[in-house]
Amino acid sequence: MKPHSVERVLIAVDNSIESLETARTGARIAAGWGSLVRVINVIADGSINAAIEEAGGPGSHTRRCRESQQLLDHVVNEVRSAGVPGERVDAVAREGQPFRRILEEAQTWCAGLIVMTVSDRTGLRSAYVGSETEHVLEFAECPVLVVPARTKREGSAA
C-alpha cells in the first residue's frame, strides 16, 4: 500500500523565525511526497500600506515588497535544500489580509495541504492559535498543518 501523499503543498510564511522553521518542516514533507510546493507571503493591504507610508515615510511599501521578495527567495532556497527540485517549487507575494489571501491561493492553486505556523495571538479566543491561523483552520477546504513554535530556543535563558 502506497503511503498517503499530497500533490501540492502551500507553505505560508512571514518574517518570523517560527515561520522559517515551519517552512523547513513543510519542505521535508513535500520532498518526501514528491509534491509541488508554492510558498506564499502576504503583504498588508493598501489601506494599511497608506498608514505605513505615512508613519514610515516614503518608500515604506516598496521596502516591504522588496523584503517580501528576499524572504521568498530565501525560503525557496530552503525548500530546494530539503530535496524539492527547483522546477517543483515557486513563490508568490500577495497583498491583503493574510488569512484571506492564503485561503484564496490554496483554492485557486488547488493545494492539497496548507502548512503554516501559529500566527500572532490576539484576543481571548486565540489563546492557543493566532487569529490568522484560526481563520485558515476554520475556512480551509483542504487539510492544514499548523507547526507549533518552539517555546524555548537552544541556548536561551530559562
Image (cartoon, helix red, strand yellow):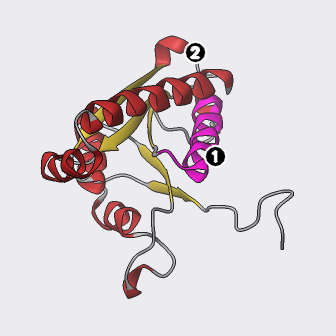
Q: Report the front residue among 110 and 47.
A: 47
Q: Residue furthest bottom?
A: 124
- The residues tagged by marks 2 and 1 sit, at their Cα atoms, a distance apart of 19 Å
In the rendered view of the protein, which quadrant contains the C terminus?
Answer: bottom right
Label 2 amino acid? Pro
Whether residue 22 is situated above or below residue 84 in the rendered picture? below
| Quadrant position of residue 120 | bottom left
Sooner in the amino-acid sequence: mark 2 or mark 1: 1
The residue that label 1 is drawn on is: 21
| Quadrant position of residue 156 | bottom right
The residue that label 2 is drawn on is: 85
In the rendered view of the protein, which quadrant contains the N terminus?
Answer: top right
- Secondary structure state at the residue bearing disc 2: loop
State left or right for residue 118 relative to residue 27.
left
Q: Report the label total.
A: 2
State left or right for residue 82 relative to residue 118.
right
| Residue 23 is a magenta residue | yes
Q: Which residue is pictured at 37% across the width and 64% down the height?
A: 137
Q: Which residue is pictured at 34% across the width and 60% down the height?
A: 136
